[in-house]
Image: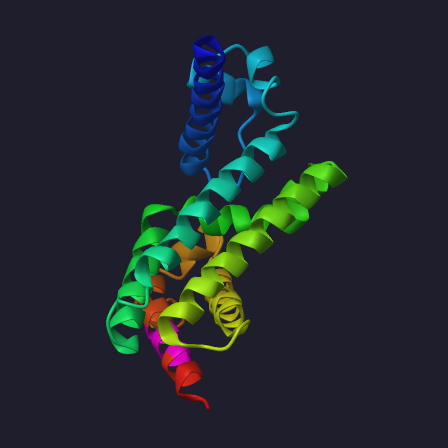
Amino acid sequence: MTQRALDSEDKQARRDAILAAARGLFLQDTRNLPSVARIAEAAGLAKGTVYLYFCTKEEIFMGLLWAEWLGLLQEVHDSFSPEGGSAEVQLTRFMQRYVCYLDEHPELMRLDAMAYSVLEQNLGLEQLRAFKLELTQGLVSAGASLEAALGLPAGRGLSLLTRAYALTRGLWQSLDYPDSLCRLLDEPVFAPIRPDFRTELLAALGEYWRGALATP
C-alpha cells in the first residue's frame, strides 16, 4: 500500500513538473506553443516520459488551462460565503482577487483564447468531454457558492459568473494587439484605444456586477 502511494505521488509530481515547465516556456512567447521536446528538456525528463502522461503538446496545455481554471474558480469559493459580510464587501473582495489572479496567471487568457481553435482540435472526443464536464461542474459549484452567499435563486450565480467571464474575455481580446501593432500604437495619440486592461476590467466588472445585483 505504501509503495502504491509513493508511486502515485511520484506520478503526480512528474505531471506537475511537466505542466510547470510548459507554463514557463509558454510565458516566454504566449503566441506559440513550445514543442514536447523543449518541455521535456525544461522538466528534466526524457521526451518519451512526457508522452506517458500526455499524448500531444495540446493535451499538455489543456491540462495547464484546467489547472488555471481551478485556481480561478477557487477564488470564487474563497471570496463568497454566507458569513462573508455584506454583498458589497464580498463583491469588492471578489473583484480584487479575480483581477489579481489574472495578473499573476497571464497564461490563462491566452490559453483560453486558443482553446477552441487550437487546443481542443487536437484532443480526442473522450478527453474533450472530460474537460468540458469538469469545467461545467466547477462553474456550477462556484455559482452555488455565490448563490448561498448572496441569497440568489438557483442558477443565477452561474449566469453571473459566465457573463462576467465573457466580459473579461471580450475586453482582453479587444486590447490584445499584435506586437507589431503595439509598437505603432505606442504613440501618445493612440492612448485612448490602449487603456490599461486591469483598470478597465475592474471598472467594467464593478459596473456589471452592481448593475446585475441591483436588478430585481
Task: Find residue 176 and report its horizontal and vertical position in percent.
Answer: 47, 57
Instruction: Using the image, determine if residue 135 lies above or below residue 198.
Output: above
Front one among 152 and 20: 152
Q: Is residue 134 left or right of residue 101?
A: right
Instruction: Using the image, determine if residue 25 lies above or below residue 6.
Output: below
Colour basis: rainbow
Count of numbered marks: 0
Task: Find residue 205 and report its horizontal and vertical position in percent.
Answer: 38, 72
Q: Residue furthest front?
A: 1
Q: Is residue 125 left or right of residue 145?
A: right
Residue 180 on the magenta span: no
Question: In the image, what residue occupies the spot 61% across and 18% down?
Answer: 51
Q: Residue furthest bottom?
A: 216
Question: In the image, what residue occupies the spot 47% across and 23% down?
Answer: 12
The rendered magenta stretch, by its main secondary structure, is classed as helix
Instruction: Using the image, determine if residue 44 lies above or below residue 169.
Output: above
Front one among 141 and 60: 141
Instruction: Tell me the quarter of the picture where residue 148 sits.
Output: bottom left
The region drawn magenta spans 203-209
Front one among 89 and 67: 89
Task: Find residue 147 and report its horizontal and vertical position in percent.
Answer: 44, 70
Residue 205 on the magenta span: yes
Task: Find residue 16 and report its horizontal and vertical position in percent.
Answer: 44, 26
Instruction: Using the image, determine if residue 132 lies above or below residue 164.
Output: above
Question: In the image, what residue occupies the spot 52% across and 43% down?
Answer: 66
Q: Residue furthest right?
A: 125
Front one among 162 and 102: 162
Q: Is residue 86 left or right of residue 139?
A: left
Question: In the image, what residue occupies the spot 40% across and 62% down?
Answer: 185
